Amino acid sequence: MLLAALSAQATEAPTPHPAWKHLLQEQITRARRTHPQAFLRLAVAASRVDAMDAKKQATLAATAPGLRALGPEALWPMVERLAFPSQDKSSLPMRESARLALTVGLVEATGALRDARLAPLWMELLEARDTPPLVLHAAAGALARLETLDAANALIAFARQEGPRGEAALDALGLCRRLVATRALAEALDARPDRERMRHIARALGDAGSVWAWKTPGVKARSEEGAIRRVAAEALVRVYLGTDGDVRRAVSNALLRVDAPETPALIDAARARAEPPQQAELDALSERLRRNPLR
């Protein structure tokens, strides 16, 4: 079973310290004194979400870009709406889909700041029974982007659960570029889940090992880069011959993104054990890697 294959190192997600909301409230109160206009600008932005929702082309209106554009001073106004939801309906979008879009956008915009003080907030959203699936995905991504061992182990624990919560955590593990998270993804891929999950896991391994992501300044565990990219490449090469169609494309695309220096040798080793028809398939993979357009 897929989730049972995940690392047993994290069997239970840690519970946030009970004082965390008090600490956030102190930050919010201080921000209200120093930057009151930031709260007003967020209120104006929130008032426009119904109109955005009415014109949306996708499942949700894309609110995160506009919220990020409010600048760093909007952090605590946004956190207030997530951690201490208002009971005043007049301050919220009228349409249910617009309220969902606003919540997802708030999580994405604040999560992009990678502020470790918000880890308990992401944990609360992931643990709550009534958190919508799209918010679960946003919260899991926000937690993953902290790239701490605590975040990685929490996501591994959540990923062992069934349903939307586990799926959100598994998808987000690739954004948490820590070796323990990549190993958990490799184990999950080795379990040979259904095709859809294999595509998701392959993409997550591509996220974890992405050579371009490792060039960005936000990555924390730089000492783990080589091991993470190698583990991702090993897992992807191991399953390659057992896949076909869209799953094989997802696996090969992930290998191109990771572009680990060990990949050619891994393919050669697999070719030495393969039958002639499979050797031809691995030759095609080697050629695609040689012509990698992402380099």
Image: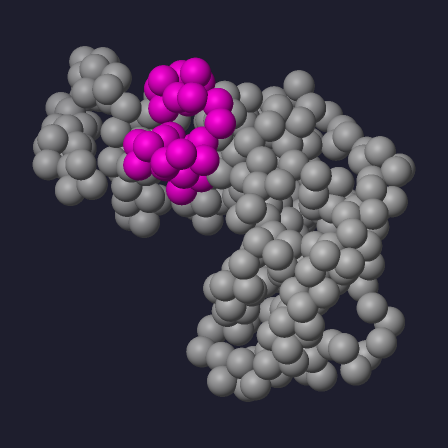
109 left or right of 273 in image = right
66 left or right of 128 in image = left
Does any portion of residue 70 appear in the rendered image?
A: yes
User: Where, by quadrant of the figure, is residue 73 drawn?
Assistant: bottom right
Residue at point 69%, 60% (across, down): 35
- In the picture shown, does residue 263 fall above or below 114? above
- In terms of secondary structure, what is the magenta stretch mainly? helix
228 left or right of 172 in image = left
Residue at point 36%, 31% (across, down): 214
Does any portion of residue 59 appear in the rendered image?
A: no
Q: Quadrant of the N terminus?
A: top right
Where is residue 79? Give x, y as percent.
71, 55
In the picture as drawn, the residue positioned furthest to the front comes out as 34
Residue at point 64%, 49% (across, down): 139
Residue at point 43%, 21% (across, down): 222
- In the picture shown, does residue 11 fall above or below 69? above
Where is residue 78? Give x, y as percent.
68, 60
Tell me, yes or no, whether the highlighted magenta stretch contains residue 221. yes
- In the picture shown, does residue 99 fall above or below 76? below
Where is residue 262? Give x, y as percent.
25, 17
Q: Quadrant of the C terminus?
A: top left
Where is residue 217? Give x, y as percent.
40, 34
Tell me, yes or no, whether the highlighted magenta stretch contains residue 4. no
In this rendered view, identify the residue nearer to me: 61 or 219: 219
In this rendered view, identify the residue nearer to me: 115 or 94: 115
Colour scheme of this structure image? Answer: one colour
Q: How many marks?
A: 0
- In the picture shown, does residue 279 fall above or below 78? above
Report the magenta residues as a range: 202-231
In this rendered view, identify the residue nearer to me: 225 or 8: 225
163 left or right of 227 in image = right
In this rendered view, identify the residue nearer to me: 195 or 147: 147
